[in-house]
Amino acid sequence: MDGIRFRKARPEDAAPLGALHVASWRETYAGLLPGEMLDELSADARAAMWHAILSDPAAFGETAVFVAESSEEMIGFGACGAQRDAALAAQGYDGEFGAIYVRRSHQGAGIGRQLIRLIAQALRAQGRRAASLWVLGENEAARTFYDRLGGTIIGEKTDVQSGSIRTELAYGWRDLEALAAESC
């Protein structure tokens, strides 16, 4: 991870974060989601969303966002906050990993693992004990990554969007302290 810098995102990061969000979705979900859905993604809309979140994290479940940069270019990000899914909250998962994305060109270098560690630390600092995330069932690369980090499947749901039916799996971690201390 030489030359990779990790830091907490700021409101002025909204535009590059929006562009990264769209680019990483297009890389990650090509062939898994309808092309029309990916084509309709807007970096400007994502930038506006991130600006709102980064300007007032408390209004968005105490969302914390971290970015990974290489040569001043954003190459990955992770976000976390309060659990938004009532069923997962009822199971004791009080925190949520809302997003974790790394550009394909930088995957396999430990960047995702470090982002997970940072957002687990942020959740612990918020007093949260356990966290979950949702992943597309067909996203084998992400599922393998979460399996390696000790995540377990704790839920499943079916979603219909843009005429596409997809299964999402919830992964959970009961011990955020261990995940926050994970060696990168």
Image (spheres, rainbow, N blue to C red):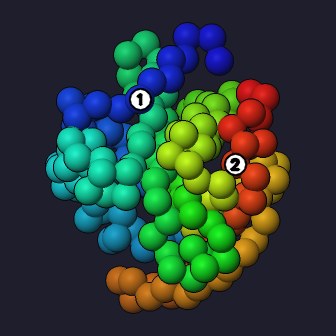
For the point 46% across and 47% down, the residue is 79
Q: Position of residue 17 (x, y in %)?
A: 32, 39
**Residue 135 seen in render:** no
Up the image or down, 32 lies above or below 157; here it is above
Q: Position of residue 8 (x, y in %)?
A: 41, 29
Q: For the residue labelled by badge 2, is the local secondary structure a helix, a strand or a loop?
A: helix
Q: Nearer the viewer, residue 150 or 56?
A: 56
Q: Label 2: which residue?
A: 176
Residue 65's quadrant in the figure?
top left
Hey, what amino acid is under mark 2? Leu
Callout in the foreground (1, 2): 2
Alpha carbons under labels 1 and 2: distance apart: 19 Å
Up the image or down, 139 lies above or below 46; here it is below
Hey, what amino acid is under mark 1? Lys
Up the image or down, 157 lies above or below 173; here it is below
Q: Label 1: which residue?
A: 8
User: Callout 2: few (<14), some (14-19), or many (20+) C-alpha neighbours within 10 Å?
Assistant: many
For the point 69% across and 38% down, the residue is 180
Indicate left or right for 107 with 66 as reference: right
State the quadrant of the N terminus: top right
Q: Which of 112 and 139 is in front in this view?
A: 112
Indicate left or right for 39 with 178 as reference: left
